[in-house]
Image (cartoon, helix red, strand yellow):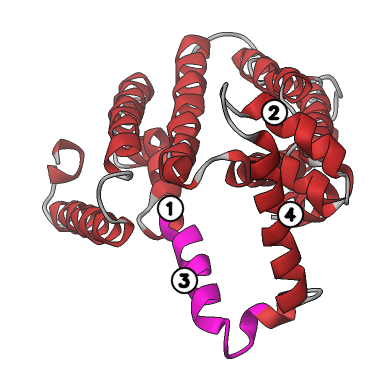
Amino acid sequence: MLGSLFGGWFQDRVGRRFSLALCSFLSALAVAVMYVSYVPADIDARRVVFLIGKFFQGCSIGAVMAAAQTYLSEILPPVLRGSGMAFFPVFTLLGQLCGALVIYGSLNRDRGYVAVFASQWPFSFVPILVAWLIPESPVWFVRKRRVDRALVAQARLDPCGTDTKAVVERIVRDIQYEEAVQGRATFRECFAKANLRRTIIVLWVNSLQAVFGLPLLAKASYFMQVVGMDANRSIIFLILGIILGLLANVASVWVVARRGRRRLILVTLGVAAGLWLSVGIANCFEGMGIVW
């Protein structure tokens, strides 16, 4: 949360690319701190080192997510925004799958957790490479009154035959209109009467993952061990659940572009609520929890 708030402010000042690269590099450093957290002899010192690494990694990841989402929202044409944003949960699940596989391979090994920490390094360095390859957001250049640089960046994003100058001129008009109508917008205005309904919708949509229980599903292996399943089998079930979720998210890339967002939210939340209710009912009967 702190990283996301800082990342929003930071990327508006230095650009989406630099923010993505720098925060990914800081994430790699945080992984290095966690990797060596076992070195101190004192257990409390180990905990402190690990906590410091985890804190800075969390801040870095929050800033990286903010930069990536902002970048996509600014470069994607409207027809692709739904499908493009659907890739975020796809790759979130792909990351969970990689983590689950690494954990499964590290079970019952001496200091297996060290290998788990080290496996995060490639995922920290890939965004640095991507940030070096992609152009800066033309929208950010226009906001900084650097229209000439915006033309160069937009030309790299446009397919052949596109009138890049017309695209950038439209971006300039949109930003000029925003500035003329809204001036310097503040967070306080989000909660003004005229904007409150939209703000509530945005907050609610962003809380949906927590609402339907995704944080618990991400820790399904621990949850199943609590109710009596052995560790190896619980990891296998976690991997299976992630794969099914990944397939569903890949399908959603197609579905979200062809069906209304509101209908999909209501239907899938209804199904999730029914399944959670059935888990609670199964727990009322001895021996049914794991089976169900």
**Label 4 sits on what residue type?**
Val
Q: Which residue is drawn at 38% across and 33% down?
A: 221
Pick whichever of labels 4 and 2 is earlier in the sequence.
Answer: 2
Magenta span main SS: helix
Residue at image mark 3 = 201
Question: Residue 282 at what x, y percent from top left?
Answer: 14, 52
Q: What stretch is highlighted in magenta?
A: 190-209
The circle on residue 155 is 2
- State the CA–CA distance, disc 1 to disc 3: 14 Å
- State the CA–CA distance, disc 4 to disc 1: 35 Å
Relative horizontal placement of residue 154, taking residue 94 as reference (left or right):
right
Where disc 2 sits, the SS reads helix
Tag nearer the camera, 3 or 4: 4
Does 249 appear in magenta?
no
- In this view, the residue in front, 152 or 78, is 152
Q: Is residue 83 above or below residue 203?
A: above
Pick whichever of labels 1 and 3 is earlier in the sequence.
Answer: 3
The circle on residue 24 is none
Q: Residue at x 74, y 28 (%)?
A: 135
Q: Residues within 10 Å of mark 4 (few under 14, many from 20)?
A: some
Q: In this rendering, does residue 14 appear at all?
A: yes
The circle on residue 172 is 4
Does 200 appear in magenta?
yes
Where disc 1 sits, the SS reads helix
